Image: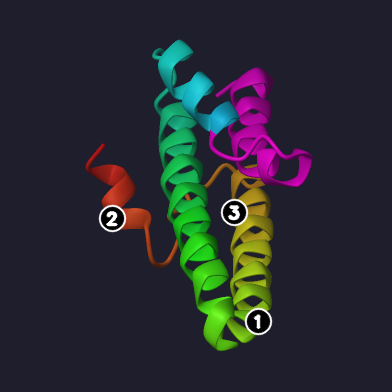
Amino acid sequence: MDTNDKLLAIACHASLFVALGVIFPLIILVLVKKSAFVTHHAKQALVSQGLFYIGYSIAALLCVILIGFVILPVLFVIQLIFTIIAIIKTLDNDYYAYPVTGQLAEKL
């Protein structure tokens, strides 16, 4: 695997930190077909970040009954931890799958 593949895979996960969320992994997934490593990580990042955004939307609606104010920071911390782990595993050339959404991403 070359350095460009590793950088693209890391960028898919790290796009969370630069407000590109699901857009960057989706672009990479569509454009990069030759590298199984990059495709795997783009799918993982896309599905994980997409489902977290759905979770944030539900938590925002639940702010009306105040429970959302507890759920939002918990979701953020979990997403942050999972993303950092994904970046570290990608740096080690591992095929990382997010704990909750990993199997769903493989079906893409």
User: In terms of secondary structure, where does tag 1 sit?
Assistant: helix
Location of mark 1 (residue) = 69
Location of mark 2 (residue) = 103
Location of residue 10 by image quarter: top right
Which residue appears at 36% of the width and 55% of the height? 102
Task: Give the extent of the magenta segment.
Answer: 1-22
In the rendering, at what x and y percent does residue 45 appear? 51, 44
Q: Is residue 32 magenta?
A: no
Residue at mark 3 to residue at mark 2: CA–CA distance:
15 Å
Location of mark 3 (residue) = 86
Quarter of the C terminus within the rendering: top left
Around disc 1, counting alpha carbons within 10 Å, would you say few (fewer than 14), some (14 to 19), or many (20 or more)? some
In the rendering, at what x and y percent does residue 70 appear? 63, 86
Location of residue 24 by image quarter: top right
Q: Is residue 24 left or right of residue 106?
A: right
In the rendering, at what x and y percent does residue 28 appear? 52, 21
Q: Give the residue type that dot 2 points to.
A: Gln
Which residue appears at 50% of the width and 58% of the height? 52
Please report whichever mark, 1 or 3, sits nearer to the chain's N-terminal start: 1
Q: Give the residue type that dot 3 points to.
A: Ala
Residue at mark 1 to residue at mark 2: CA–CA distance:
29 Å
Nearer to us in this view, 47 or 10: 47
Please report whichever mark, 3 or 2, sits nearer to the chain's N-terminal start: 3
User: In terms of secondary structure, where does tag 2 sit?
Assistant: helix
Q: Give the residue type that dot 1 points to.
A: Phe
Q: How many marks?
A: 3
